[in-house]
Amino acid sequence: MFEKSPISVLILSMVTFGIYGIIWLYKTSEEMQQRGIELPSFIFVFIPILNFLYAWKYYQGVERLSNGEHTATMLFLFSLLGPLSLVSFWQTQTTFNKVAAAG
């Protein structure tokens, strides 16, 4: 996993009207799968209802990577609460940075 500034992920996602966020999600999903975390097909992100399943599985993977520091339930709920979804972006990228620093 590569270290990225959480603030840059948030700003780029807003400036590009979410396009960077989708690319970031795809790249981080690939990195999680390389670490042995099972995720559904990325196409689920674009299919109503199935995108909730994808988000849940994604956040379960983040919980596993963070060793329970950030729970899937908390991240999933934040992602559903409009502006608070930025909190889940921030915490997810922070987890990835810790994993990248640990090797």
Image (cartoon, rainbow, N blue to C red):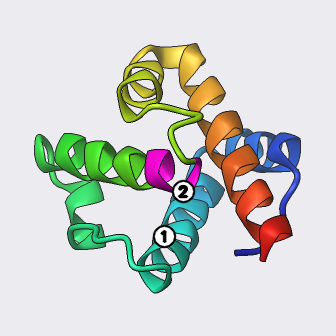
Amino acid under disc 2: Leu
Depicted 84 relative to depicted 30: above or below: above
CA gap, disc 2 to disc 1? 17 Å
- Secondary structure beneath dot 1 equals helix
Q: Residue furthest front?
A: 67
Residue 29 at x, y percent in the picture? 46, 69
Number of marks in the image? 2
Which labelled disc corresponds to residue 26?
A: 1
The 10 Å Cα crowd at callout 2, few under 14, some 14 to 19, many 20 or more, is: some
Q: In this view, does 101 lie to the left or right of 33?
A: right
- At a point 71% along the width and 36% down the height, the residue shown is 90
Residue 16, visible in the rendered structure = no
Residue 92 figure quarter: top right
Q: Viewer-proximal residue, 50 or 67?
A: 67
The 10 Å Cα crowd at callout 1, few under 14, some 14 to 19, many 20 or more, is: some
Residue 39 magenta-highlighted: no
Residue 78 at x, y percent in the picture? 47, 20
Residue 64 magenta-highlighted: yes
Q: In this view, does 26 lie to the left or right of 45?
A: right
- At a point 65% along the width and 59% down the height, the residue shown is 20
- At a point 61% along the width and 63% down the height, the residue shown is 24
> Which dot, 2 or 1, sits closer to the camera?
2
- At a point 22% along the width and 40% down the height, the residue shown is 52
Quarter of the image for the C terminus: give it: bottom right
Which labelled disc corresponds to residue 80?
A: none
- State the predominant SS element of the stretch in magenta: helix
Quarter of the image for the N terminus: give it: bottom right
Query: Which residue in the protein does label 2 denote?
Result: 65
Q: Viewer-proximal residue, 65 or 53?
A: 65
Residue 35 at x, y percent in the picture? 49, 79
Specify the segment rendered in magenta.
62-66
The numbered mark, 2 or 1, whose residue comes first in the sequence reads: 1
